[in-house]
Amino acid sequence: MNLNVPFDIDPQHTAKIARLSILSALSRLTMSLTQIALPLFALAIGRDEAFYGFLVAAAGYMQGIFLFPAGWFSDRKGRGTAILIGGSFAGICLLLIPFTTDPLFILIIYGLSGVGTGFSRTSIDSLIADHTRKGDERTRSYGYTTAVAILAAMFGSFFAGYFLDPVAFPYISIEMLRYAILFWMMGYFRIMTGVFGLYSEKWLRQNGNDGTVIETTEDVEPTFLEEETTEKQDTETALLFGTTQLMMGISSGMTIPYLIPFIYAAFSPDPIVLGSVPAIANITLATGTLAVGLFSDRVGKVRMIGSLYFLAPILMVGIVYSPWFLLMLVFYVARNAIANMNRPAFNSLFMDEVAVSRRARAFSITRVMWQFPRQTGTLLTAFLLAYFADIVEYGKLVFPVAMLMYPISVIPLYLAVRRNARIRIERNRDVLPYQQAE
């Protein structure tokens, strides 16, 4: 196959990307429903933004604890099995939440749902990498699957806000019943994700090469540069990429979970309007993600990521200091796209740098180094909101400063890529004389 020709005209590849896109969309749909339902649910049971922060942090910590074991399990037992376990466990937890309004029980059950997320998250990303070729094809594939997932998230956040608005479905007069239905929907979609993930992996293995075959059957004669990396090199790569994630994690944790509560407190929109905020933002994000997936290999993945992250703190200033809701919405839409549309470039870049056989484990290291700082930032903000600060005043002071970490975080990623390129060149220089002699 000529990789200079757009590969999406290949029917087999199109079917493969369609299946992976549906899997990504199912996974993302639950997250988008939670984005609106969870903070409003915390307020509906008489709690505040701080309790919502504790919920997010609890699930994030549990996800972080189980990410590496889940990655090891995924590499050994298969991506589909890991996705099934993760989706089923998280789904059952979400199904249980509506049966109580006890804060401690809700905190425990929602926290445990993070275990399932830990199993699903890295396995889905690794499954995409396993069945795509290194380079432009893989980046494009991440672009397509992520864009479809974001469009599903757009529907999810809008539907959650619409469903919780009293004007929608007026025959549902009990407020808690609306939340119960949403949580049951979340649980159902999580379980569906697990089942679909298991059968998707089986279908992909039956209808295409797995990652090991793809990485070793290029159309050109393989060189030393294309050979598998060492375990030590993969670990060091994961730690450097993880340092980027760590820096972003603490920044993101102090800001992103609280943006919707900030908007709700600062502008008092109706639930349907509040749900429309991330829905509108996801339209731009889906377009931007697809553009990154299609063009970042030409621009340069590291350069693309750095350029996007440079704008994040500037746009955050616009969000927190906008005097009007519509102006804030413009900045929110732009910041959401700029800070998140790099995922195809980041995932493809990382998967290109590590060996197939250690992909999920290596990726889980970066996710662990994201999760714990992310939840620590969220937890820190929850304590500050509970005892010291109003969320609007806190957001104006802290959100823009925290976002300054985004452009700085690109440095370790850049160092990892340069280091690996240098190692490959040096090792290739050592082997080349022997190849010529043969």
Image (cartoon, grey):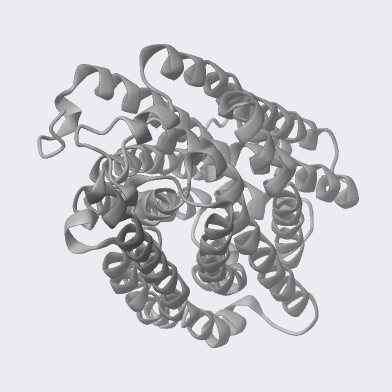
Task: Say which residue appears at 35% left-offset and 66% top-offset.
Answer: 426
In this view, the residue farthest toward the front is 437
Q: What is the x, y in percent for residue 424?
A: 36, 60
Q: What is the x, y in percent for residue 124?
A: 51, 36
In the picture, measured across the screen, residue 4 lies left or right of residue 73, that is left
- Quadrant containing the N terminus is top left
Task: Say which residue appears at 48% left-offset and 33% top-offset.
Answer: 127
Instruction: Locate residue 322: give its quadrant.
Output: bottom left
The answer to whether one can see residue 163 in this image is no
Closer-to-camera residue (226/73): 226
Closer-to-camera residue (291/33): 291
Task: Say which residue appears at 74% left-offset and 79% top-offset.
Answer: 384
Closer-to-camera residue (32/351): 351
How many marks on residues?
Answer: 0
In this view, the residue farthest toward the top is 206
Task: Say which residue appears at 39% left-offset and 43% top-offset.
Answer: 150
The vertical placement of 138 against 339, above or below, is above
The answer to whether one can see residue 373 in this image is yes
Q: What is the x, y in percent for residue 24?
A: 45, 35
In the picture, measured across the screen, residue 262 lies left or right of residue 55, that is left
The vertical placement of 293 against 12, above or below, is below
- Quadrant containing the C terminus is top left
In the picture, measured across the screen, residue 59 lies left or right of residue 295, that is right
Instruction: Locate residue 254: give its quadrant.
Output: bottom right
Q: What is the x, y in percent for residue 218?
A: 26, 33
